[in-house]
Amino acid sequence: GQNIDQPTEMTATEGAIVQINCTYQTSGFNGLFWYQQHAGEAPTFLSYNVLDGLEEKGRFSSFLSRSKGYSYLLLKELQMKDSASYLCVTLDSNYQLIWGAGTKLIIKP
Amino acid sequence: NAGVTQTPKFRILKIGQSMTLQCTQDMNHNYMYWYRQDPGMGLKLIYYSVGAGITDKGEVPNGYNVSRSTTEDFPLRLELAAPSQTSVYFCASTRTEANEKLFFGSGTQLSVL
């Protein structure tokens, strides 16, 4: 079956660094997305990885290892506005999106 | 830029009532989607469309219907509302392939009592 695992909740301190992990098992693989979702709002796109390695975009970076079925989202210099849920999403062989339940990130001052 | 416009934002229905959630996008996107999001769960695909006149079922289509008469509009119809349909609904669109990022509407909080 198809499955995405990510921690339910994480807590971090303002100004620090946090890594949100995601492991997946899917029928084929055509890439992995990370979306950010603030409470009561719609998801917004953060990143897309299809090849192994690290993609950096400002304070946010996303890593992919296809052989390990593993990705992480790295957030640096945390700000209070980064408090949100982070959704790991894979694209399977039929180009269907499989959504993880999300990791709620709580930032403390 | 309006992007994806979804209405209403909130709605309370009685069991057995019907309603239509409206979704319009002004980006000339071919692909449109309806998702529901339940607490603690990932988004579940209800229906999707790859272009005007073409619709297909997603993972959880029962109790819903859609139409796609124009590129811009993709309404979602609930015919006989049930408590199990209490959820947050999101409409989304992409330009072409599924490996492009989704643009979401602001969501509809629906309660069926």
Image (spheres, coloured by chain):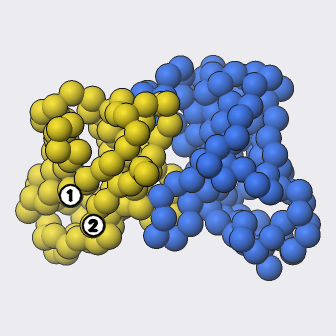
| Residue drawn at the location 37% of the way across and 60% of the way down | A102
Tell me where residue B27 sits by quadrant: top right
For mark 1, does the 10 Å Cα neighbourhood hold few (<14), some (14 to 19), or many (20 or more) residues?
A: many
Three-letter amino acid code of the residue under disc 1: Ile
Residue position for label 2? A7
Q: Position of residue B61 (x, y in %)?
A: 72, 50
Q: Is residue A60 visible?
A: no
| Residue drawn at the location 33% of the way across and 48% of the way down | A25
| Residue drawn at the location 66% of the way across and 48% of the way down | B46
Q: Position of residue B77 (x, y in %)?
A: 83, 50
Chain colored blue: B
Q: Position of residue B25 (x, y in %)?
A: 66, 31
Q: Colour of chain A?
A: yellow
Are the residues tagged 1 and 2 within 8 Å (C-beta)?
A: yes
- Near-viewer residue (B24 or B32): B32
Three-letter amino acid code of the residue under disc 2: Pro
- B1 relative to A72, above or below: above
Q: Is residue B85 visible?
A: yes
Please count the marks in the image: 2
Under circle 1, the secondary element is: strand
